[in-house]
Image (spheres, rainbow, N blue to C red):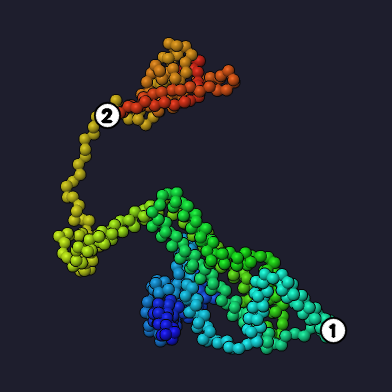
Amino acid sequence: MAAVTRALENRSLFEDGSVLALLRTDNAPYVLGLLAEHLGADTRTRTAADLYDLLGGDLDELRLLGVADLPRSAQQYCATWVKQGYLSRRAAREERTEEFSLTEHAFAALRILDQVNAPQATVTRSRLTLLTERLRTLARETDRDSARRIDALRAEQERLDAQISAVLELGAEPMPVAQALEMIEELYELALDVPSDFVRVRGELERLHRRLRLDLVEHDGSQGEILEQLFLGVDAIEGSEAGQSFAAFHALLIDPVQEARFHEAVDALATRDVAARFGRDRIAYLQGYLTRLQTESHQVRHAMIDLSRSLREFVRSRQFEEFRALADRLRRPQRLALTIAPHVRPLTKLDVELTPSGLIPHSVGQLRLYSPSLSTADDALGLAEPAPLDLDALRATIRESEIDMAELADAVDDAFGRHGTVTVADVLADHAATQGLASVIGLLVLAQRHGEPVVGDDGGTRTEAISWTTGGASPHARRAQITAYRFTRAVGRDTHG
């Protein structure tokens, strides 16, 4: 039964597994070769224009070499590779364009091909040593017994003291070149796997972001519950397993002490005899390794921030309500269908005619060119007789667009002549605000120019309540509290309004 289970699992893996599916698609050797060169080496992200240009030259060269299975353009192939899962396409952060990068499954497929092309020795001393040292470190660091921890540390101290004594007596004996080469090969393979992890982490964060948005759309609670779920979701992005693992790695990566130790070790290794056999190009790769990781780490960090910000904006802009309404409209006929399913057969004909909401395709031969001359009027245009100028209508039009300062000045002078010193409230009590709020604003302008603020007993400026009625078909009473101004002289016709 175990063998049958394993066989069925392998069948599912071959049919549904994205990595194996990529290896089995048409033109997979050419696709993975081109993408590995342009997106799998030092440059992991390219803008659409740059990638189209590079792939266009490569496709032309392959056709000249006799590869006839690549008839389409670079743009068409990139769109196809996005659908197949080779490429991921996102909006560029700093430019108004798109950018492409390899998916995590494409990186895994490239690693499989690399391992087939350059297989590693199955048994090496460095691999066993690395495994043993890591297991010992893990066992020691996870031990809760203080006595055993102290014994292990003292044993390590004695071993180091013995090595120091041997070096003092006999001198430093370097590791054999063959053994050193095995160890650096193992470390190099490990280093190659780390950058592809960034793509995997970013993919996990994007999948988590989509799931949280879906939860917000399908959540039936109140606005407060949705906001609470939102911030829990934002915490879930940064607090997920992928987010926590990346945060710890990012903190270690930008640690200046760790960076200095790494560069010091690589620079020292470049001067050793093993560097010549290992390859100067791979030594150079390790020397620029941290810089490359820091760049990709910052990109993932920015992506995490953008996802959290997008999730907040999704609720703050109330977009989720539109999506919830759409989801409810889609679920409503489904619930109705489940209700009537026991009573109506699926093939029952209904007397309902549905009008398609989309475009109905037609043959290109049915299209006809539109000629604007067919709808042009043949009658000559005549000149309209000018209407007589109505001065009252013109004056009314001007009053709708400007404040009638002359009318307000006459109102202030009339109130001042009858009562002596008056305020804005006194003027409005005698004369209606024919222009509504505009009349009130005009009186305040006149009061600032020709009056003075009313000062109270405490030395502060007093305020007063005013009221007026708006005009129109349905007048409304309005009230406001303004700074009190006193007119101490007549205004006359104000010419600066």
Residue at image coords 45%, 14%: 416
Is residue 63 visible from the viewing direction of this image? no
Residue 469 location (% of width, % of height): 36, 24
Residue type at mark 1 is Glu
Point out the residue furthest to the right here: 169
Image quadrant assignment for residue 383:
top left
- Closest to the observer: 93 or 62? 93
**Is 366 situated left or right of 106 in this image?**
left
The residue tagged 1 is 169
Compared to residue 129, the image places residue 452 above or below, namely above
Given the image, on which type of amino acid does mark 2 rest? Leu
The image shows residue 8 at horizontal and vertical percentages of 40, 82
Report x, y in % for residue 179. Answer: 68, 87
Where residue 26 appears, x then y in whole percent? Answer: 39, 81
Q: Secondary structure at mark 2?
A: loop
User: Based on the displayed image, in which of its 4 quarters is residue 180 positioned?
Assistant: bottom right
Q: Residue at x 77, y 85 (%)?
A: 173
230 vs 332, left or right, is right
The residue that appears at 50% across and 83% down in the rendered structure is 113
Residue located beneath label 2 in the image:
389
Mark with earlier residue (2, 1)? 1
Q: Nearer the viewer, residue 418 or 199?
A: 199
Q: CA distance from mark 2 to mark 1?
A: 118 Å
Q: Which quadrant, please, contains the N terminus?
A: bottom left
Q: Which mark is residue 25?
A: none
Which quarter of the rendered picture does the C terminus lie within? top left
- Using the image as rendered, state which of residue 486 and residue 247 is in the foreground: 247
Left/right placement of residue 486 relative to residue 67 reads right
Q: Relative to 474, does residue 159 appear above or below in the rendering?
A: below
